């Protein structure tokens, strides 16, 4: 083990960020303990789509980080045995402005090198028969996206890590993080050389002042899952509303016009932050959503009209007759108020706190874990990182 590599690592939280850090630290030769207050992963990581989403990241370091995530999920899924479908994604356009954004995006040299395909309406419907052809302007196919079921992936990772000798302390609530130890509610203390806190919104219990200064806020989303559908969609599918949501398309010259069009013609969708992703799993069920509601806290209501907005928008770009909804739920994650897709804080010299991944934790967490663990061998005090 390198001289500065920590031997004992304690990770608080068994969501995707915690588990990817746990496996990466174990692979680096560290002795890892994961502390989780629930009996299994139950937070934001299993309440999202299970999509690995490089198409959402602008070209540059974060896209490379996302592509690393795709690579690692392929490797880990084969090793552990959970389904991870490398189906790619199809971004379909129905507004002229959205089609212009896709054309501008695809015209970049980096986009051509990435293997994106610009498809005519006829080509899109021929390859993906469940696309709604009415008003379709065209589409972009990306080969890099992966669809998995989050709960299966995280459960598989937990069992795999346990088989490797990583210790899990479930039903154990961390109440205080000291300079070199985590104190839990039953009085036990877990000593560490390094600690990673990846406990989602619950991190404000441990370091409220640091989080308050980090320009982040909670975001609640509404999601649903369908019963199995008899046909395959063929790719993770999104449309006009989603183009305005992710960083990859922000610099396209026509994005301003698209945003103006959405404000004028889809104001209720914009009000609730609805942009729809259709992700089909190996059992043919769909995960569908979502909405974005911001605030310091939320009422307990699940808004039926928001679910209706999701299904209404889904019908504009897919043809899924007879689709039945089996369940719906809510999730809460922390999101940057200044547009960052990840915020890494250092509230103690040997403590790293990872938060504000938004909906991209599944995509970016492997790369972030590599950065975190690599920093331990380079210095005695890793710098805080904000991207």
Image: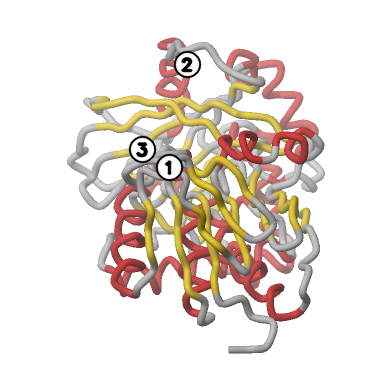
Is residue 49 among what the camera can see? no
x and y, in percent, of residue 72 in the image: 47, 70
* Left or right: 166 as drawn, with respect to 339: left
User: Residue 139, how many percent across, how many down?
Assistant: 54, 47
**Residue at x-position 60% and y-position 19%:** 297
Q: Which mark is residue 153?
A: none
- Name of the residue lying farthest toward the front: 187
Q: Earlier in the sequence, mark 1 or mark 3?
A: 1
- Height in image: 338 above or below 302? below
Q: Nearer the viewer, mark 2 or mark 1?
A: 1
- Residue that label 1 marks: 186
Q: Name the residue tied to disc 2.
A: 306
94 or 237, nearer to the observer: 237
Label 1 CA crowd tier, 10 Å (few <14, some 14–19, many 20+): few
Q: Secondary structure at mark 2?
A: helix
Cβ atoms under marks 1 and 3 closer than 8 Å = no
Element class at badge 3: strand
Q: Earlier in the sequence, mark 2 or mark 3?
A: 3
Residue 203 at x, y = what percent?
Answer: 61, 40
User: Is residue 208 shown above or below 28?
Assistant: above
**Measuring 69% from the left and 50% from the top, which residue is drawn there?**
342
Quarter of the image where one finds residue 215: top right
Q: Cα distance, mark 2 to mark 1?
A: 41 Å
- Which residue is found at the position 54% from the left and 56% from the top? 363
Q: CA distance from mark 2 to mark 3?
A: 15 Å
Q: Which residue is mark 3?
A: 287
Looking at the rendered structure, the secondary structure element under dot 1 is loop
Seen in the image, is 1 located left or right of residue 331?
right
Q: Residue at left 58%, top 35%?
A: 201
Where the N terminus falls, by quadrant? bottom right
Q: Which mark lies nearer to you, 1 or 3?
A: 1
């Amino acid at each position: 083990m390198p001289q500065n590599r920590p031997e004992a690592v304690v990770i608080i939280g068994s969501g995707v960020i915690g588990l990817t850090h746990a496996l990466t630290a174990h692979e680096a030769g560290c002795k890892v303990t994961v502390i989780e207050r629930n009996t299994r992963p139950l937070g934001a990581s299993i309440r999202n789509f299970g999509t690995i989403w490089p198409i959402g990241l602008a070209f540059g370091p974060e896209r490379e980080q996302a592509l690393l995530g795709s690579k690692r999920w392929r490797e880990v899924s084969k090793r552990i045995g959970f389904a991870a479908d490398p189906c790619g994604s199809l971004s379909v356009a129905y507004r002229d402005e959205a089609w212009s954004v896709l054309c501008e995006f695809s015209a970049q040299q980096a986009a051509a090198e990435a293997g994106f395909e610009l498809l005519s309406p006829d080509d899109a419907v021929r390859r993906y028969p469940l696309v709604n052809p009415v008003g379709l302007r065209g589409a972009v196919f990306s080969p890099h996206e992966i669809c998995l079921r989050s709960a299966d992936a995280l459960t598989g990772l937990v069992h795999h890590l346990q088989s490797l000798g990583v210790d899990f302390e479930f039903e154990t609530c961390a109440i205080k993080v000291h300079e070199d130890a985590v104190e839990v509610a039953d009085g036990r203390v877990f000593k560490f050389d390094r600690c990673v806190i990846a406990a989602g919104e619950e991190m404000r219990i441990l370091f409220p002042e640091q989080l308050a200064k980090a320009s982040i806020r909670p975001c609640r989303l509404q999601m649903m899952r369908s019963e199995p559908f008899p046909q395959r969609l063929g790719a993770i599918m999104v449309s006009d509303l989603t183009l305005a949501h992710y960083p990859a398309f922000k610099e396209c010259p026509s994005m301003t016009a698209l945003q103006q069009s959405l404000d004028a013609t889809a104001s209720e969708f914009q009000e609730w932050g609805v942009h729809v992703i259709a992700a089909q799993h190996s059992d043919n069920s769909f995960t569908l959503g979502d909405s974005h509601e911001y605030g310091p806290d939320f009422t307990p209501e699940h808004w039926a009209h928001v679910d209706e907005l999701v299904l209404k928008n889904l019908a504009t770009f897919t043809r899924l007759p007879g689709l039945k909804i089996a369940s719906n739920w809510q999730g809460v994650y922390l999101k940057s108020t200044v547009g960052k897709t990840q915020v890494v804080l250092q509230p103690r010299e040997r403590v790293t706190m990872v938060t504000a991944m938004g909906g991209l934790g599944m995509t970016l967490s492997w790369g972030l874990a590599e950065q975190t663990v690599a920093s331990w061998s380079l210095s005695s005090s890793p710098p805080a990182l904000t991207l």
